Amino acid sequence: MKNNTGKIGIFDSGLGGLTILREVVRLLPQREYLYLGDNLRAPYGNRSEQKIFEYTLAGVEWLFGHGAEIVILACNTASANALRKIQREVLPLKYPSKRVLGIIIPTAEDIGQFSKAGHVGVLATVATVRSKTFEKEIKKCNSHIRIVCQSGGRLVELIENGGNEKLLQAEIEKVTRRLISKDKLIDAVILGCTHYALIKNQIKNSLPKDIGVIDQGEIVALKLADYLRRHKEIGKKLSKESAVCFYTTSDKVVVKKMMAQFYGKKISISTVSYKIGA
Ligand code: DGL
């Protein structure tokens, strides 16, 4: 790859990664981005670790094939279930100069500053909760913090399908009630699924007022900027074209409307297809 043509790939199972993209583009507007949402196969959150790995790897390889030098898994489910394997088993053999970064470690590193009580709740998908990645990573850098996790039930499915506000509200109330009943001292809730950041205000409104709600967009953007400062060998390969291109594995007409709504701007989008598995 020539210098100054590399792109930053942002991958998610669907719409949730837009909450990361928005903040990354706000902080680093001069870069060139490819956003890929695997809306066809979303939600990932109820799938097996192996399936999540296969789907994530296929998305990452598509992004590499289209010029990404670095890919952010803007998806906690993929960060928890696929990142390590991709970093350890795939990159060294097939793409030694490329990078894939997740979003759970950056969040875990910063969580101490959001909780005075040291009691933190995490709302995440079933596959993220099952992996215990948030607990493990938070314990590594904030060993005093007590963490309780709760799965977000059907939230991702309801967001991806769009529309049914009543069902969505009922689901939000159910999962937030369950989360806070697990630990009465929680004073911070991490939205540990990027889709949940799309409905942050609704989640905030169904939690007690004194509980802070943390989404990952700004945290990830700041960590990426810092990473690129520290890794000049990657930074110098990146284009300064100031562009964002959107791709989906599903119907682009349907997805375009939702992506534009959540991204907050007009977008152009293409449907792509790629092979899953070897
Ligand atoms: N947005 C994703 C996450 O952060 C995945 C949601 C899903 O596909 O279930 O976990």
Image: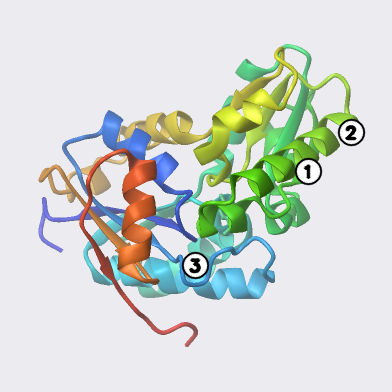
**Does label 1 or label 3 sit earlier along the sequence?**
3
Disc 2: which residue: 182
Label 2: which secondary element: helix
Contact (Cβ within 8 Å) of mark 2 with mark 1: yes
Q: Residue furthest bottom?
A: 278
**Residue 228 locus on image (x, y percent):** 30, 38
Q: CA–CA distance between discs 2 and 1? A: 9 Å
Left or right: 89 as drawn, with respect to 229 = right
- Report which quarter residue 235 is drawn in: top left
- Report which quarter residue 50 is drawn in: bottom right
Foreground residue among 27 and 112: 27
Disc number lying in front (3 or 2):
2
Disc 3: which residue: 56
**Does label 3 or label 2 sit earlier along the sequence?**
3
- Report which quarter residue 140 is drawn in: top right
Q: Amino acid at mark 1?
A: Gln
Disc 1: which residue: 150
